[in-house]
């Protein structure tokens, strides 16, 4: 049986954008003379722009004001977004659920600018599509507000919805929102307690009753 609603993370879940974000972050850091930490990917996966900035400022000496920094980072990212590819199998599942009339939304810790650019790059834009960006809420993931906002927009009880996310940060947000939470990481790893851990689009289809 298919669910009433499915709310999708974007970066790393619907689109394979995490390598592009990392490349842009590394380029932006090097452009201001900051050496990227060796564990950069693990430290920023699923984390919104402001906490990443605070970490880079406080631990690695990034000296730019946030507004200047984020413009520099996005100047590196946006040209890369044109090369963006979907995560294999994810958008096919999204479109199949859409054809079945399942309520869906994209729920991201990225800024609106990035959400729109990424979805446009992979052709996932249509009239009435629901998206929640980091700019649309007070508190981003791992707090539940982004997923609860999606449930409000879709007019569904959070308990009747699935959240799908590739990061621990996002999976924690889905669980905190009271949703059935599918954790689909880039590489096999243990998920937070209570999450349904999968490792393929085939497993995703099975969990969503397709």
Image (cartoon, rainbow, N blue to C red):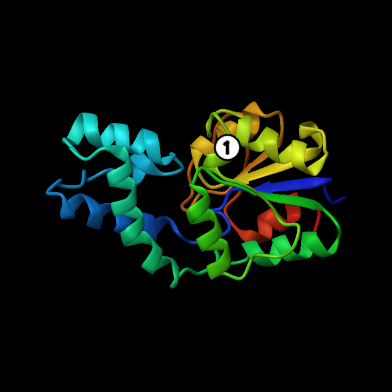
Q: Is residue 153 above or below residue 145?
A: below
In the picture, measured across the screen, residue 135 lies left or right of residue 78, that is right
Q: Which residue is mark 1?
A: 171
In the picture, measured across the screen, residue 126 lies left or right of residue 118, that is right
Quadrant for residue 83, please give it.
bottom left
Q: Residue at x 48, y 61 (%)?
A: 16
- Residue 143 visible: yes
Q: Is residue 123 above or below residue 50?
A: below
In the picture, measured across the screen, residue 17 lies left or right of residue 122, that is left
Q: Residue at x 22, y 46 (%)?
A: 38
Rendering coords of residue 37 (x, y %): 21, 43
- Crowding at mark 1 (Cα within 10 Å: few <14, some 14-19, many 20+): many
Rendering coords of residue 179 (x, y %): 71, 34
Classify the position of the C terminus by image quarter: bottom right
Label 1: state its secondary structure: helix
Q: Nearer the viewer, residue 114 or 4?
A: 114
């Amino acid at each position: 049986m298919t669910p009433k609603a499915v709310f999708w993370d974007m970066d790393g879940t619907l689109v394979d954008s995490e390598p592009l974000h990392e490349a842009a972050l590394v380029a932006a850091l090097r452009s201001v003379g900051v050496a990227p930490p060796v564990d950069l990917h693990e430290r920023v996966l699923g984390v919104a722009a402001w906490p990443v900035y605070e970490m880079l400022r406080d631990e690695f000496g990034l000296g730019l004001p946030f507004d200047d920094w984020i413009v520099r980072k996005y100047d590196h990212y946006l040209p890369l977004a044109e090369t963006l590819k979907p995560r294999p199998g994810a958008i096919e599942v999204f479109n199949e659920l859409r054809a079945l009339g399942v309520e869906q939304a994209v729920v991201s810790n990225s800024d609106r600018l990035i959400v729109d650019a990424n979805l446009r790059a992979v052709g996932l834009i249509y009239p009435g599509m629901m998206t929640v960006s980091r700019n649309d809420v007070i508190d981003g993931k791992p707090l539940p507000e982004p997923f609860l906002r999606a449930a409000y927009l879709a007019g569904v009880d959070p308990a009747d919805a699935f959240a799908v996310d590739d990061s621990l940060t996002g999976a924690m947000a889905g669980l905190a929102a009271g949703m059935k939470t599918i954790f689909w990481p880039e590489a096999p790893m243990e998920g937070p307690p209570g999450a349904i851990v999968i490792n393929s689009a085939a497993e995703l289809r099975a969990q969503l009753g397709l």
